[in-house]
Amino acid sequence: MSTILNVRCAGTTITRLFIHNEKQQQLQKCQVAFQSTVSNVKVENIDSKSADVEWQQALPYKSMPRLTRYQLLRGFLKGGEFADLSLNDFVFKCRERLGDIYRLPGVIGQPDSVVLFNVDDFEKVYRTEGIWPKRPGTDALRYYRENRKDGFFKETMGLNDNDEKWAKFRHVVNPILMQPKNAKLYLEPLQKVNLEFVERIREIRDPHTLEVPNNFLVDINHLAFDSVGVVALDHDFGLIRRNPDLEEVRVLCEHMSAFLKSIYDLGIKPSFYKYITTPSYRRFAKSMDLTFDITNHYVNEALARLEESPSKDGEERSVLEKLLKINRKTAIVMAMDMMIAGVDGTSSAITAILLCIAKNPEKQQKLREELLAVLPHRNDPFTIENMKQLPYLRACIKEALRFYPLAFGNVREIGADLVLSGYQVPKGTGALLSTNMLANEELFYPRPREFIPERWLRKSDTTLTDGQRLVAENVNKFINLPFGFGPRSCVGRRIVEIEMELTLANLVRNFNIEYNHSVEKPFSYHLISTPAIPLTFKFTDLK
Ligand code: HEM
């Protein structure tokens, strides 16, 4: 017998929990726990025989096209066919061979995974992910935190936890990081960082060609680091102009990326690290030790500063101060997670946006006109209110993230027994959802290799008719999810959206931006995209 729970908030169904062969008692437990973490939510119970019938009629899991354990292990060994492939290339290579759904067998104690390229399957997985969605792949960080000798993470592993512990932590940090009203806490510091970036460009560009040097990516990385740092650590590192060579930060930058790298190397590829300490795990643990020491140091510094001069009106002045009000450990763990999860992605996203805007001068001009209409003078300050009046700015960013997706998609542990593309897939199986890659397919977004921000405008913001908006009828919200989906989606989304909007808006209102070089293969992909060409943009001052 299967059961479907409809979770409704303010009269709208926000998620459907489909539970196959679960005891009623467990359902009730889950219902109570969920209602205790989210207010104003009702859980409806709908018994469904049709789900049972679908399951009975589906093909057995074992008959799904797959790689064998041997093929997988051999393929990733040195010289093997997958050894040097990025995650993107690996899943696409297997798709060509095996089709739109296939199995990757679990090796070395890992559960099986299925790789999905079918939109209906994405929807089913997300709709049934449950109230505590699990994102596999980050086991190495959990393992590191569980095994730290000082037991620092004993009480909480932050958002790297799972189940109820994750939900509790997320419930506490969500209002601070996600509520639009808190954006005022970081708008000003982020704008300060962005103005420094504009000045930096003026300083480093060649006076004759007006192009910035080959290694401009370093400056974009500094912008990303300063932006996340000013929010997460309440500290203006000044990497962009004042302290570009800060040794401690250089080390931190180098090591922070290890977390994202570990998701593929230790989370998806076969690895023995839980049985013997492999060299890649040793490198990862060293990076996490360093990241821990440095972040811990800066949070303590912020704490001392705040104790020395508490705000007079009792209102917290920063995200970190709000987190510290909860407790010190929450603040440190969250700050650390923001740094390791946020900096690299922000840097690649800004690069993607700049390449798109530089290669599409008409769209750039249209954006400039929108900015001038709302902020007529170049130094008019951005406010939360006037930023709401810039739909074309947001559409440019959304289209750039579709055009150059940061990651192939997302991962989930399947929350219930499900029928996917006609196959039975048991609960607990890992799923790789290629949501973002499909956003580059003609079937869903006509003229996919053209940068057309107009796709994303509401009818009221565009003169284009439905037919011209270049979003196919069969597209649904489960394709193109740069920030993931549901309760486990990106907790830094609000912060990074403001950061990307400020960066693009400041650059477009100060400069004409060009990129007069080839943009063939501008990114390499490991787990997420990394710029792989010299970013010699030309920045010409506007009159
Ligand atoms: C353009 C830049 C960024 C992109 C595209 C991005 C994307 C994502 C995605 C796809 C996820 C997984 C969501 C899911 O499983 O449904 C995620 C999770 C997360 N992101 Fe971001 N992110 C970005 C920037 C940031 C920043 C700046 C921060 C911190 C300030 C951040 C912090 C996090 C954290 C902590 C999680 C884990 C959330 C959880 O498991 O509850 N991200 N992000």
Image (spheres, rainbow, N blue to C red):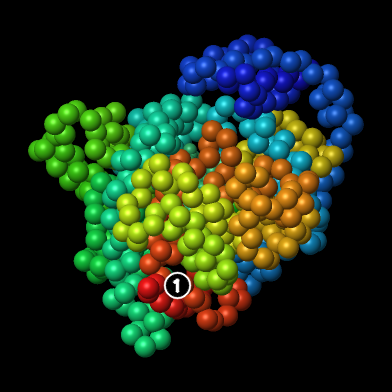
x, y (%) of residue 369?
49, 60
Residue 214, image quadrant: bottom left
Residue beneath the point at 67% across and 30% down: 128
Q: Position of residue 244 (x, y in %)?
A: 26, 68
In the rendered structure, the answer to whether residue 374 lies left or right of residue 201 reads right
292 vs 134, left or right, is: left
Q: Quadrant of the C terminus?
A: bottom left
Q: Is residue 68 above or below residue 142?
A: below
Q: Is residue 476 above or below residue 39?
A: below
User: Quick check: 3 above or below 79?
Assistant: above
Would residue 125 be visible to someone looking at this image? Answer: yes
What residue is rendered at 9% in x and 38% in y?
308
Question: For the view shown, which residue lies furthest in the right direction?
Answer: 57
Residue 238 x/y as whole percent: 24, 61
Across and down, in percent, residue 387 comes to 43, 47
Q: Name the residue type under label 1.
A: Asn
Give the total number of marks visible in the rendering. 1
| Residue count near mark 1 (Cα–Cα under 10 Å), binned few <14, some 14–19, many ≥20 | some
Q: Secondary structure at mark 1?
A: strand
Task: Identify the residue at image location x=57%, y=27%.
Answer: 131
The residue that disc 1 covers is 512
Q: From what the image shows, is residue 419 above or below residue 373?
A: above
Picture quadrant where residue 22 is located:
top right
| 370 left or right of 219 in image | right
Q: Nearer the viewer, residue 86 or 477?
A: 477
